[in-house]
Every structure is written in structure tokens, then in C-alpha cells.
Amino acid sequence: RAAASDDAASSSIYDSIGGNWEGTGITAKRVSAVLRNIGARDLTVNVNSPGGDFFEGVAIYNLLREHKAKVTVNVMGLAASAASVIAMAGDEILMGDGAFLMIHNAWTVAIGNRHDIAQAAEVLAPFDAAMAKVYSQRAGISEAEAAALMDKATCI
């Protein structure tokens, strides 16, 4: 929800990323509507989310990166998984006391024989690489260092 003021606006991501069973998850469609409503004003995004759908997270990340004004992301409690990707969209990223940012490799559900499972792992590789690139750019570390942190499911 966007709260209008004279110079800045704020929005909160306090749910899972992507549509969920309750119909309450944060989607790119919802974030796009918020951005249209606030126009070209500075935006503060408060985040407390366990994550969710990778592709919705990437879409929200890109929407926030394209915003014409300054975007500040406040991690209020947890920005995990897809929410950590969204947090990387901030021109400024702030973490509250006791807050965590959790990064990990992409997940999927796979079923089948060893060839099917190996293929599923191959499908995930470009998603891991994309996340490592985003994390490395924002943290000022190499993509290999970001990938190593993702391999360990690191909390920061």
C-alpha cells in the first residue's frame, strides 16, 4: 500500500512473494500499480517477507530498479529468498536492528529418474547465476563469492 506525502511515498512488502493460496501474496502487478500511483517521487519500501516465487521477485526487482526516483529498501525483519532479490533493488538498502537478509540457490520440486533430476538441476543453474550477479553487484563482491554464499544458504 502506498502512503502519499508531499515529497516521498512508502510501500510495504509484508507477505510472501507471488500469489499464494490465500490470494494475499505480493505480486508484480500490485507493485506496478503502487508505482503508477506514486509517480516519480522517492519511494521507501519496507520489507518483512519469507520470499516466494523467484520470477515474481525478479519482476518486482526490475520494476523498482526502473523507478525514476530514489528507492530506499528497509529490511524490517526478514528479506529471504525472492524477497532478498527485491531488497537488492534499493538505491539504498537499510537493515533494522536484528533484521536478516537470507540468500540461497533456487529451489524446485522434481520427480523422476536420475536423468530427470539431473535435468532439473541444469534448469536451475541460470537462475542461480542471475541471482549471484544481482547480489555481487549490490554487495561489491565477485559472482563466485556470491554463489558460495548462496550455496551455504547464508543469513546476513
Image (spheres, grey):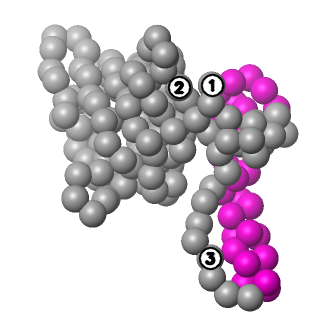
Residue 22 location, quadrant: bottom left
- Type of residue at label 1? Ile
Q: Residue furthest bottom?
A: 113
Residue annotated with mark 3: 110
The extreme front residue here reads: 98
Residue 21: x, y in percent? 27, 63
Q: Which is more toward the observer, 14 or 35?
A: 14
Q: Could you tell me residue 65's position as x and y percent?
A: 47, 34
The CA distance from mark 1 to mark 2 is 6 Å
Within 10 Å of the Cα at label 3, are there few (<14), some (14-19), or many (20+) other Cα atoms? few
For the stretch drawn in magenta, what is the main secondary structure? Answer: helix
In the picture provided, is 68 more to the left or to the right than 41?
right
The reply, left or right, for residue 103 in relation to residue 81 is: right
Identify the disc placed on residue 100.
2
Whole-angstrom CA distance, mark 1 to mark 3, is 29 Å
Q: Quick check: marks 1 and 3 in contact, CB under 8 Å?
A: no
Determine crowd level at label 2: few under 14, some 14-19, many 20+ residues with C-alpha closer than 10 A. some
Circle 3: residue type:
Ala
- Is 154 within the magenta? no
Write the start and end of the magenta stretch as one range: 114-143
Residues at discs 1 and 2 in contact (Cβ within 8 Å): yes
Image point (31%, 47%), residue name: 26
Residue sitting nearer the eye, 115 or 143: 115
Picture residue at 38% right of the left edge, 31% below the top: 48
Give whichever of 110, 45 is nearer the camera: 110
Q: Is residue 66 visible?
A: no
Which of disc 2 and disc 1 is earlier in sequence? 2
Q: CA distance from mark 3 to mark 2?
A: 29 Å
Question: Which residue is located at x 23 percent, y 38 percent?
Answer: 34
**On the rendered structure, is 65 left or right of 113?**
left
